[in-house]
Amino acid sequence: MIRIERQGKTAIVYFDRGEKLNAFNQSLIQRLTKTAREFEHDHATQTIVLTGTQQAFSAGMDLDDEMWNMPDATDLSRRETFYSGVRLCEAWERLPQITIAAINGMAVGAGVALALACDWRVAAQDAFLYAPEVKVGINLQWGALPRLISLVGPARAKRICLLCEKLSAEQALDWGLLDEMAPAGEAVAVALDLASKVNKQPDVTVRMIKEAVNATSHVLHRATSFADADQSQLSGGFEAARAARDKFLGRK
């Protein structure tokens, strides 16, 4: 599922589940988390480009994943599973390297959440971002909501989450969700160009500045989202949420 390519000081991390437009299941979540943690003490890598496939960064959380139906799991096991995505995004956010999400095709739900955990986001001009969590009866979790609010402000964050509108790359760039827009199919190339500019700066200074900016801008993020997975576990079990998931999947 994970392939790493190295170009000088830049590592390109490709993730490809091979089905369902790169929707996240527990296996993909765990492997991406492990990959991030392996970079924590990597002194040779200064920038990391994270990307999915040409068809999709990710179609979001797989609604057939085990997390939605764990009748034999203990309460602690069930809660740990719901927090797997939170740990994934935290692992990518706290990396000392500059991280750039390169989005081709689509970033949906959890795909948006992971992209928000990166320092910068680049999307192809024919890509779109979409947060449909409300449609399936849950909140935008994985620690994504405070990150989203920091980028676009509260009113636009409410619009993105409550109206579930698909944002074109052009609109996402205008709203501050993206840092660069690339020609179709060229998101990785543009992300690599950004990375090359970072790589020209002194390694230690880059890491110090990233840490200082994050410490200032993220100071309340954890405090305001620490229970978001608990909220999703609760609301996701509501009858209305189960019916919404079935409708979303075309089951009813």
Image: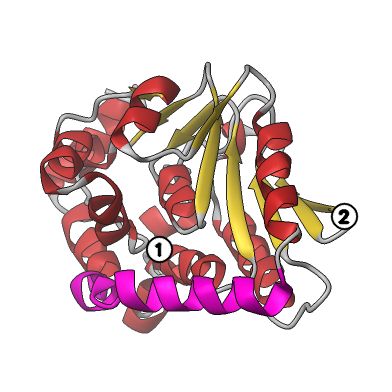
Q: Is residue 1 visible?
A: no
Relative to 103, 41 lies left or right: right
Percent x, y for residue 4?
82, 54
Asked whether the beta carbons under mark 1 and mark 2 sit within 8 Å of each other, the answer is no
Residue 70: assigned label:
1
Q: Is residue 207 magenta?
A: yes
- Which quadrant of the structure image shows residue 194? top right
Residue at image coords 73%, 33% = 189
Q: Residue at x 63, y 55 (%)?
A: 28
In the rendered image, residue 32, in percent from the top left (x then y), is placed at: 64, 61
Colouring mode (rainbow / by chain / secondary structure / one colour): secondary structure
Q: CA distance from mark 1 to mark 2?
A: 39 Å
In this view of the protein, can residue 245 be seen by the observer?
A: yes
Q: Secondary structure at mark 2?
A: strand
Looking at the image, residue 125 lies above or below residue 20: above
Give the number of the disc on residue 155. none
User: Which of the two labelled residues, at mark 1 and mark 2, occupies the earlier sequence position?
Assistant: 2
Name the residue nearer the viewer: 89 or 215: 215
Q: Which mark is residue 6?
A: 2
Front residue (pair 108, 137) = 108
Q: Is residue 212 magenta?
A: yes
**157 left or right of 52?**
left
Residue at x 79%, y 57% (from the top left corner): 11
The answer to whether residue 24 is above or below residue 53 is below
Which region of the structure is painted magenta? 202-227
Q: SS class of the residue under badge 1? A: loop
Give the number of the mark in front: 1 or 2. 2
Q: Amino acid at mark 2?
A: Arg
Residue 234 in the image, given as x and y percentages of width and height: 18, 63
Q: How many other residues sit within 10 Å of disc 2, few (<14), some (14-19) or many (≥20)?
A: few
Name the quarter where the C terminus is drawn.
top left
